[in-house]
Amino acid sequence: MAHAEAIVATWPAALAPVDGQRHWPAALLEGCLGAHAELLFFLPDLLARNGAGADESGAPIPSLRALHAHAPQSPAGLRARERIHQLERLAHLTGQFSLMEYGFLYDRARHLLAIGYNLDEHRLDAGYYDLLASEARLCTFVGIAGASCRRRAGSRWAGC
């Protein structure tokens, strides 16, 4: 926590925040404080379970499933179950995002993905990603992992 606070204290303030965006060091500190509060919420159950202070027990921190199984109706057990449901929802959404069809963005003549698609004009945008662009690289990994795109030897696309 002290490290995140030190970053906030020493990092120059944002010159002009855009539309309510927070300065990233402040967002980092807020995330650290939230994670710390979550751990403190679970701490009483962890201490009761291990019979010692968190640093003294040497026992690994239990998983959310283990916390829920240990005391399903306790506040910590109920929150653990809530977090499990949130993580399962996020995993499901991530899986749904991975099902994107890339074929309509693929230019067969260039073996590249178009940067985007203009819905109003029903055409691909004029720019193309090569495989060195970070966004295209991520798109490539997701497309190949989801089996909606294929790769030839080297770094050229075989198609989507």
Image (tube, helix red, strand yellow):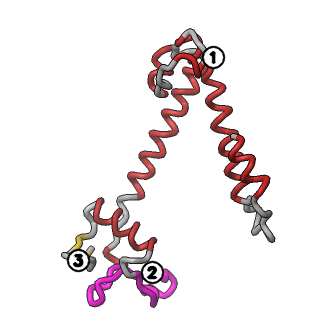
What whole-number distance in Å separates the C-alpha atoms at marks 2 and 3? 21 Å
- The local crowd at label 2, few if under 14, some if 14 to 19, many if 20 or more residues have their Cα within 10 Å, is some
Q: Residue furthest left?
A: 153
Residue 65 placement: quadrant: top left
Left of 159 or right of it: where is 72? right
Q: CA distance from mark 2 to mark 1?
A: 51 Å
Q: Earlier in the sequence, mark 2 or mark 1?
A: 1
Pointer 2 or 3: first along the chain: 2
> Which quadrant of the figure contains the N terminus?
top right
Amino acid type at image mark 3: Gly
Foreground mark, 2 or 3, reads 3
Residue at 33% of width from left, 82% of height from top?
A: 112
Magenta run includes residue 160: no
Residue at 53% across, 12% down: 49
At mark 2, the secondary structure is loop
- Magenta range is 106-129
Sequence-wise, which precedes: disc 3 or disc 1?
1
Q: Is residue 32 left or right of residue 132?
A: right
Q: Which mark is residue 44?
A: 1
Q: CA distance from mark 3 to mark 1?
A: 55 Å
Callout 1 amino acid: Pro
Q: Secondary structure at mark 3?
A: loop
